[in-house]
Amino acid sequence: YAEIDQQGNMVNPLGEATGPLEGAVILSATEYRETQTLQTNLQNLYANTVLLRIDSFNETTFVDYSKTLVKKPIVASNTQSVLIRAVSFDDAAGQYLVDSTDFVLLTSDTLGWSNS
């Protein structure tokens, strides 16, 4: 990681991100705003959206109204976050109730959000 000036020149080499910043992703301001706009638009369109870190997504099960497990879609190996559409969450069972198999709305990786 490094600090870059307006002309794209490195002005302050900071080194590799470690500690709490390990695995951090750097986005330009434009990418960040586009990401936030896309996420906000989907959250406004669908009432019950939940943003999950990839580890939570991988550890969580999803069921339909008949309590049948819903298979999670395969996401790219560099996925960091998943925006899902869920009806509710059952704390005791650690499961999200989803109303369709198309419950993953977006995935984010090091390049930003993409439609699933």
Image: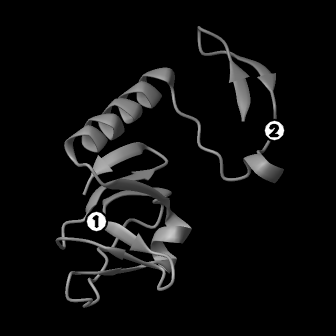
Q: Helix, strand, or loop for circle 2?
A: loop
The span from disc 1 to disc 2 (Cα, nearest Å) is 43 Å
For disc 1, the marked residue is: 87
Residue 6 in which image quadrant: top right
Residue 84, percent from left and from top? 33, 60
Sequence-first disc among 1 and 2: 2
From the viewer's perspective, tell me whether residue 6 is left or right of residue 90.
Answer: right
Q: Nearer the viewer, residue 4 or 89?
A: 89
The amino acid marked with disc number 1 is: Val
Q: Where 110 sits versus 57, above or below?
A: above
Residue pictured at 78% horizontal, 44% vertical: 16
On residue 15, the disc is: 2
Residue 82 in which image quadrant: bottom left
Q: Nearer the viewer, residue 93 or 74?
A: 93
Q: Where 51 sits versus 4, above or below?
A: below
Residue 44 in which image quadrant: top left
Foreground: disc 1 or disc 2: 1
Give neighbour class at mark 1: few <14, some 14-19, many 20+ (Cα, 10 Å): some
From the viewer's perspective, tell me whether residue 27 is left or right of residue 113.
Answer: right
Residue pictured at 25% horizontal, 65% vertical: 103
Residue 69, percent from left and from top? 29, 88
Residue pictured at 20% horizontal, 88% vertical: 66
Q: Where 110 sits versus 4, above or below?
A: below
Residue 39, percent from left and from top? 34, 40
Give neighbour class at mark 2: few <14, some 14-19, many 20+ (Cα, 10 Å): few
